Amino acid sequence: MATHSESLAETLPFADRPVEKAPGHWVLARAGKTVLRPGGLALSTWALKRAVLPGSDVVEFAPGLGVTASAIIEVGPASYVGVERDPNASARVDAIASGVGRCVNTDAAETGLPDESADVVVGEAMLSMQGEKAKRAIMGEAARILRPGGRYVIHELAMRPDAIAEEPATEIRRALARAINVNARPLTVADWRRALEEVGLVVEETRTAPMALLKPGRMIADEGVLGALRIMRNVARDKDLRERVTTMARTFKKYDRHLCGVAIVARKPKESQ
């Protein structure tokens, strides 16, 4: 009889791929990790509070496992729409949103949603995995669907300091890409802010947190003691899983001083501004 974690793994995106080929965040999800944000649950909570979600029409880009979707729905938005291009993840979030909203299986760069139809757009840990052109397209789409005065909240991986030279920045991006099997292209905090401004948004607040995704203290803070122990047990029992998680942890540790999580709250100006 399959265990709960085995059954969950079978329904996750990329479940049909070998562990060594799957994107890193879905590998961690197979291990039982639910919080997959670089700055952790605390930074996500900070950002969502500043989004002013109660009574708002909310759109979430790339909701993934639906953890943030659940948090959004819990505080009582007027409506919720998830935009998720993976069909398995989209179906999962659609079930979570039932009664309040829906999840559409499409790309965040072309949502098909009406102009100025959202008060809040949320996106976590998804822009970092896009190339520069795709980043701008997704940010531009957020700006398009926001009503004037609406807020775009992002939580992404960032490099530091802002003045980091191109050579070490390129080395970090390549190392991350090898470790997580995704062409990760994090920006500096200053460049994240600049990118939002380039699509016509006004940055209101910024906060950073250590990139401690796989450190014991963060694991306990994000998943609870029992959750952290369950993840450790799952990793210990599976050789392939253990090798992938170890590779990711080593890479994150090697570049620790140059990585952080960043949350930014940006606003679409009203026409008179």
Image (cartoon, grey):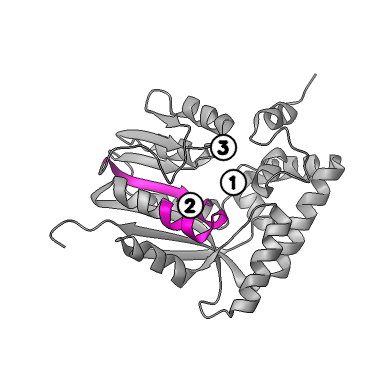
- Dot 3 or dot 2: first in sequence order is 2
How many other residues sit within 10 Å of disc 1, few (<14), some (14-19) or many (≥20)?
many
Task: Please say if 214 is above or below 116.
Answer: below
Q: Residue at x 53, y 27 (%)?
A: 91
Is the Cβ of the residue at disc 1 closer than 8 Å to that at disc 2?
yes
Q: Residue 214: name its quadrant.
A: bottom right
The label on residue 44 is 2
SS state under label 2: helix
Q: Residue at x 37, y 47 (%)?
A: 121
Front residue of 29/268: it is: 268
Q: Is residue 212 left or right of residue 241?
A: left
In this figure, which residue is indicated by the disc labeled 3?
Answer: 65
In this figure, which residue is indicated by the disc labeled 1?
Answer: 35
Task: Please say if 203 is above or below 86.
Answer: below
Q: Residue at x 35, y 40 (%)?
A: 58
Pinpoint residue 4: horizontal percent, then vertical percent. 71, 27
Q: Residue 263: name its quadrant.
A: bottom left
